[in-house]
Amino acid sequence: MSYVLNDPATFADESAAGFVAAHRDLVRRVPGGVARAAATPAGQVAVVIGGGSGHYPAFAGLVGDGLAHAAAMGNVFASPSAQQVYSVAKSVATEAGVLLSYGNYAGDALNFDIAQRRLNDEGIRCRTVRVTDDIFSASPDEADKRRGIAGDFAVFRAAGWAAAQGWSLDEVFDLADRANRRTRSLGVAFTGCTLPGADEPLFTVPAGHMGVGMGIHGEPGIDVRPLPVADDLADLFVDGLLAELPDLVADSHGARVGVIVNGLGAVKGEELFLLYGLIAARLESAGITPVEPEVGEYATSFEMAGVSLTLLWLDDELEQAWASPAATPAYRKGAVDRTAAVPVSAEQDAADSQIATISAAGSEQAGAAGSTAQLVIHAIDDVVEAHVDELGRLDAIAGDGDHGIGMQRGARAAADAADRAAAAGAGAGTVLAMAGDAWADKAGGTSGALWGAALRAAGLRIGDSAPPTALDVAEAVAAGRDAIQELGKAQVGDKTLVDALVPFTAELSTGVAASLPLAEAWAAAAAVATAQAQATSGLLPRMGRARPHMEKSLGTPDPGAISLALAMTAAATVLAGRHTEQGEMR
């Protein structure tokens, strides 16, 4: 559990503020994260990393000479938003371009990809290396679906060193990609971890057992085995990693490897050193030479008791990168030549800085439609608040347990943005678009990006110039559905919110085509969405963090589908009330 906190909702921001205050000589606050205190040298590729909070020293602690130029910082166990990634990258970008690198989680991939497209569209060359080192999270045939754990550190080291050599973006990408393809990790968990403010851990491990193949976002192990003695644990790690040599390594005998023995939060130094000694002996017996091993905490998960082993199979260039000097808040090695620091900029509200000036709506009726959209967003906020714990519980069964918190942050931010827009007299289009932007920025994660994109797409379709008709609303919902499926790539049957959204959209369109009033058509569609969301309990997830634990989710509905159904049902109540009072959007 977390002993030091005020409000769990502000935990990540307050922690980040304290981190910067403690390391002003090395880092500065920028919108969406932190950057080196020193400016990126002209002509040097900027390496931008990032992910959710709760993993220190990943990610902010690895910003500095020899490693990253900046880190985008999401909320606890939630990816940074696309806006955060974009803002952080812009703060350090040079004409040489930007390399993005992060663990391969659905929310991170979604938001970093959106930011990459935006950077490229603005003429800032940008490429990405997703870290996929965790061998237990997918088979070798699906290595691109593996998640990143402590192997992040090995890839970041390669990217940071290559950038410091003045290499081009393509050359930096190639070395970081090679590091990723030559990195393998395996982790175990002895206990779960507890989110700040939560009463229970995200998962538990039976007494005398351990979870094998755990993630760093509170995901339980993929397999549960009896707790071994240290000798047997070392065998598990070494045998597991040597059983899958990277394609680039023809023969392990005579190989040189970078080694990371990583503690997840509660396994302390003496235990890690004991384990490393056993691992080193086994590697040397296999004819493998450990090179400058790293033993400590590199990617944590709050107070989780767990440990992982990472092997980076070195070549000449990767060994130079692995052994090179670095100076960051959490990692110091050798001596680096520090450049002059740029002034620390004042913190800015990344969301507010992106909101366009609102002009008054075209008519009183359009403004009334904006008020209806505002009430809908508030109803969604209220229903999410009422079900936040249950949504988190559903998510924790096979995922990381943060869906409730992420939805809560997003809906709350959306409601605040809707209030600002409605107060300025905006129509429904602007209210929804601003709410979507705020949702995406503050929630982060997969659901934040998807809800944000859907609300913005719906707002653009409705517009502000005239009161929307029922057909306008149905087409706006369809636009939101299309935005979600384009970004998330999910189809019906994948066990995601799409399983509720697609039938909701179809039923709404059918009702509107039959000339039903919007309120009636929406209520009928919400009932269909609720039934389909519950029906996801019989599906196995084919996407996202729940995928490696798919059997555990059988019998439990998808939290994203449930939250979508709750939101649409809450919206139906608002529309019914507005229909009765004013006869709007019939």
Image: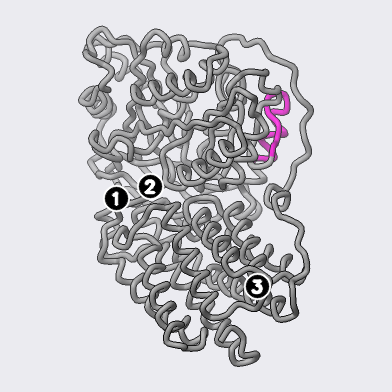
Q: Residue tagged by mark 1?
A: 549
Q: Is residue 20 magenta?
A: yes
Q: How many marks?
A: 3
Q: Amino acid at mark 3?
A: Gln
Q: Is residue 423 visible?
A: no
Q: Residue at x 43, y 54 (%)?
A: 486
Callout 1 environment at 10 Å: few (<14), some (14 to 19), or many (20+)? Answer: many
Q: Nearer the viewer, mark 3 or mark 1?
A: 3
Q: Mark 1 or mark 2, which has the lower sequence index?
A: 2
Q: Mark 3 or mark 2, which has the lower sequence index?
A: 2
The residue stretch that appears in magenta: 16-30
Q: Residue 525 is drawn in which quadrant?
A: bottom left
Residue 219 numbered tag:
2
Callout 3 environment at 10 Å: few (<14), some (14 to 19), or many (20+)? Answer: many
Q: In terms of depth relative to the viewer, which is nearer, 328 or 511?
A: 511
In the rendered image, residue 12, in percent from the top left (x then y), is placed at 61, 46
Q: Residue at x 49, y 75 (%)?
A: 474
Q: Nearer the viewer, mark 3 or mark 2?
A: 3
Say whether residue 207 is left or right of residue 437. left
Q: Which image quadrant: the C terminus?
A: bottom right
Q: Residue tagged by mark 3?
A: 374
Q: Amino acid at mark 1?
A: His
Relative to 485, does residue 581 appear above or below in the rendering?
Answer: below
Separation of residues labelled 1 and 2 (CA atoms): 9 Å
Say whether residue 98 is left or right of residue 446. right
Relative to 212, does residue 410 appear above or below in the rendering?
Answer: below
Q: In terms of depth relative to the viewer, which is nearer, 429 or 32?
A: 429
